[in-house]
Amino acid sequence: MTPSDARHPILTVENLFVELSRKKAVTPILQDVSLSLPEAGMLGLVGETGSGKTMTARAIIGLLPPGVHVKSGSITLDGSELLVDNSTAMREVRGVQIGMVFQNPRTALYPMSSVEAQMKRVLRAHLNLARPNRATRIHEYLRLVGIDDVRRVARSYPHELSGGMAQRVVIATSLLCEPTVLIADEPTTGLDATIQRQILELIADLQARFSLSVLIITHDLGIVAQYCDSVSVMNEGRVVEHGPKRQVLKSPAHEYSERLIAASDLRRIRRAKTSEPQ
Amino acid sequence: MSSLPMGNTGQEGASIAIAVEGLTKTFHTRRGIPNVVAVEDVSFSVETGSTLGIVGESGSGKSTVARCLLGLTPVDSGAIEVLGRSLVGAPAKQLRSWRSEMQIVFQEPYESLDPRYRVHQAVAEPLLLHTDLRGDVLGRKVLDLLEHVSLQPELARRYPHELSGGQQQRVNIARALATSPKVLVLDEPTASLDVSVQEGVLRLLLALQEEFGLTYVLISHDLTAIRAVCEQVAVMYAGRFVEIGPVDEVLSNPRHPYTEFLIGAELSVDPDVSPLAGIVRGEVATSERPPGCLFAPRCPMRVDQCEEGRPLFESVAPDHVAACLFADRSVDWSD
């Protein structure tokens, strides 16, 4: 029994329809997507490539690609509607109330600035801090994400960082303005097993320390099983199943979730010829 | 009834398809930047018709081993014998003609294909290079290859960008099979594919191996893929093999702390099966190569003795060796 679903939802998506309009053709991208992220909970959003996971995240933070727009639906953060046409208000949400960790840490960072310079830009845009306090805060947050040689990393450019280190910097940046919600889109894809574990443990640790509410987008059901409270399964732009992780993973109600879980367990494939005498 | 001739599959006695001894490769860099030792003293052999998996993290040297196996990257020292031919020092022209019998499938299915070639052109390319099939015969051979990798003939006129990742990888496999190779090196063939698509590609690889008696070297960082298709597995860390043995034995009874960690780090889809409690701290040091065990700086079992020299392989079970001073002990992962 996970208590998470009983908790007050901090972020909700209700009956969200998103479509791509190109010339006269309209392609539905998200169809009737509803999600609920409990306060201080961790919700996994899983599905395969093209299922609409990332589009859902981008709709939440108001960063849909050109041509893609919300047709109808509602997204609320702590009770207030985000789907209002007000870009100034949205800027206050994005990066301040909602932190975002994008997929590829190398491309999420700006290649032409040092770590410190780009983190300062975030602070300048959102927080009214006296100049000397900015560097202190940046160093504090870099230490928070487990970086030991803060000075060297702060001076580094993204290409000088390893993938794991770059992801730590991205996480530190996303937390700079003390958001209540963190959206992590495939935060460990492309990282090595040892580093994946480090990053996941870091996110779990930060979540517990700051009572963050985390929406983690992944195709890896192992992450859901080990780190999330609840899970929503997406397929072809729809949420096909939602529930506490144990319920969904152990006794999936939807046929698609069942197939996804089965496919994650490649142990079913076996070599036809097991140690047959040569 | 194979319609893909496998060439002269004579020599019944030669049951070893690949033999590598003391393979070492250093990449030289500009002055002032330390050289990168990609592979250091790696030895293994693969029996004909079986699969060796090489597992390790990025930068561990897996792909360099793969490239050396085909003579695509010259080695510093060591011996490589594939299908009874010594590749080290062989002239490029010779290597090229031998390569029809040893092929590679690269990581990125889309990047591996020429975007301007339609599927049938891509599959015909190796045949035009290595055989004298032309015209209708060539066309039939291409369709036959597509059928072998379960691609519908309608896809033959498509361009790579019009295919899904799984279909692209099947085209790459068809290309690799075109010249009837005996050895196939698979460099992360499923890394960028969705889980359900991975399964299809792995099943295809197993079926092809059975049909044509292929010998595989499967490079992967994914233990589930390794477990599904390999007989033997070698674990690579910072350019060296640290453990090698039968896949079931190594994965159920790992004797090197790094292997143990890799297995323990797998996140089960069953919420009631917890992963290993401990995590390995730090990152692989790529530039520093201390004289001792390369894993020692991150190892929870490290003692001073570990830094004295590279640990030798210790036999821990039949055909199962591990390069750790404590290969006979279990790791205490608690912090």
Image: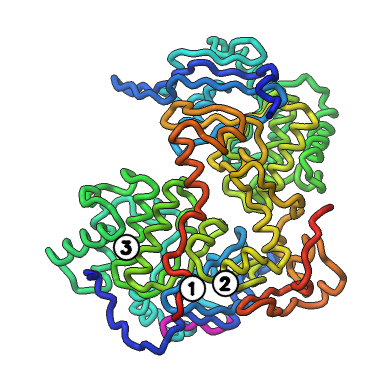
Q: Position of residue B110 (x, y in %)?
A: 39, 51
In this view, the residue in front, B245 or A131, is: B245
Query: If the image is split into quadrants, where does the C terminus of chain A sit?
Result: bottom left
Quarter holding residue A250 = top right
Q: Chain of mark 2?
A: B
The three-letter code of the residue at mark 1 reads Ser
Q: In the rendered view, tell whether residue B233 sits above or below residue A241.
A: below
Q: Position of residue B218 (x, y in %)?
A: 49, 65
Disc 3: which residue: B175
Task: Find out whether the residues at labels 1 and 2 contact each other: C-beta distance under 8 Å.
Answer: yes
Disc 2: which residue: B246
N-terminal of the two: label 3 or label 2?
Answer: 3
> For numbered disc 3, what is the local secondary structure?
helix
Q: Is residue B307 left or right of residue A241?
A: right
Disc 1: which residue: A275
Identify which residue is drawn at 36% across, 58% down. Answer: B172
Numbered range of the magenta stretch: B77-84
